[in-house]
Amino acid sequence: MELRQLGCFLAVAEELHFGRAAARLHMLPSALGRHVRLLEEELGAPLFRRSTRQVALTAAGAALLPDARALLDRAAEAAARVRAAARAETQPLRIGAIDSAASGLLPPLLYAFHQAHPQVETRLWEEKSARLLPMLAAGRLELIFIRPPQPSAGLEFLPIRQEVLLAALPRGHRLANRRRIPLPALAAEPLILPPQRSRPHSFALVAHAFAAAGLALPQGGQEAAEKQTIVNLVAAGLGVALVPDWTAQLRRPGVVYRPLAEPAAPARPEAMLGVAWMPDRASPARDAFLQVLRERPQGAAMNSRREA
């Protein structure tokens, strides 16, 4: 049985009139009748009783009717799923990221994804977590690269890497020639800090580093929200700063980066970067990106968790 033949049968069975059924299917009545006859020949039974005044279903036709409807419905659903999947593959993959992820984490991941899936366009939004999470929940983004979020139903989070703090120093600073910088040596220096109100995660990461070393956080230095601005202030000799390791990619003349002498502090949520998504929403492009991510060394050792 062909789907076209079943469609012709169903139209006649519902209209009980070959002319109206043909008009509904935008075909000639003779062509419609031919398809119905071919179906009857294949099944070996008449499906309609025809007269000059009326068309009625035979017992065989009545037996076929529910199955014909079900088969055509399933075929339509399958076609819709295929078309939706095809549209999803050609639609841009919408990605959100906080500044730390957009600058230090995402570029190599985007490169690897485009190498594996050159046909998929990606679009990037750089925002704060407080704006990215509602955009993800509303379906405006498929992936967001953020720090560990608060538990939320349906949200899945994959930790990727832990940020490590470096000391950023003016090139002519008295400590610039050291291979490692002890935090106590910075305690009396003017410290350029991210604002606590607008950059709470970055501020907490620096504050925790000093607290873990038993030191008070230096006060009275400059404040700057953007990492590029912090680095520029260091280059101008206005102070020193503790910045995430990816900031060393910002090659600014007059600035040197040095690791800290203190042992690494225990992992903190403020230092973790990862990716969040809504797994209950279908997105082939998102799933392909996550597969590329999991195949890379920094993602392979991390396990995803669903927030409840």
Image (cartoon, grey):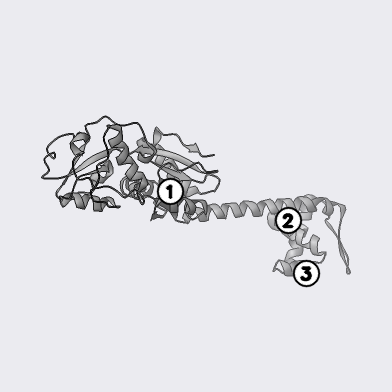
Residue that appears at 49% across and 53% down = 134
The residue singled out by tag 1 in the image is: 144
Residue that appears at 29% across and 37% down = 164
As drawn, is 158 to the left or to the right of 177? right
- Looking at the rendered structure, the secondary structure element under dot 1 is strand
- How far separated are the C-alphas under marks 1 and 3? 54 Å
The residue singled out by tag 3 in the image is: 20
In the rendered image, is residue 286 in sight?
A: yes
Tell me which label, 3 or 2, sits earlier in the chain. Answer: 2
Instruction: Using the image, tell me which numbered label, if any, was put on residue 75.
Output: none
Q: Nearer the viewer, mark 1 or mark 3?
A: 1
Tell me which label, 1 or 3, sits earlier in the chain. Answer: 3
- Quadrant for the C terminus, please: top right
Residue 8 position within the rendered picture, expressed as x and y whole percent measured from the top left: 74, 60
Are discs 1 and 3 less than 8 Å apart at CB?
no
Q: Amino acid at mark 3?
A: Arg
Residue 51 position within the rendered picture, expressed as x and y whole percent measured from the top left: 88, 66
As drawn, is 214 to the left or to the right of 189? right
The residue singled out by tag 2 in the image is: 6
Q: Say which of 123 and 167 sits in front.
A: 167
Q: Say which of 82 and 88 sits in front.
A: 88
Q: Amino acid at mark 2?
A: Leu
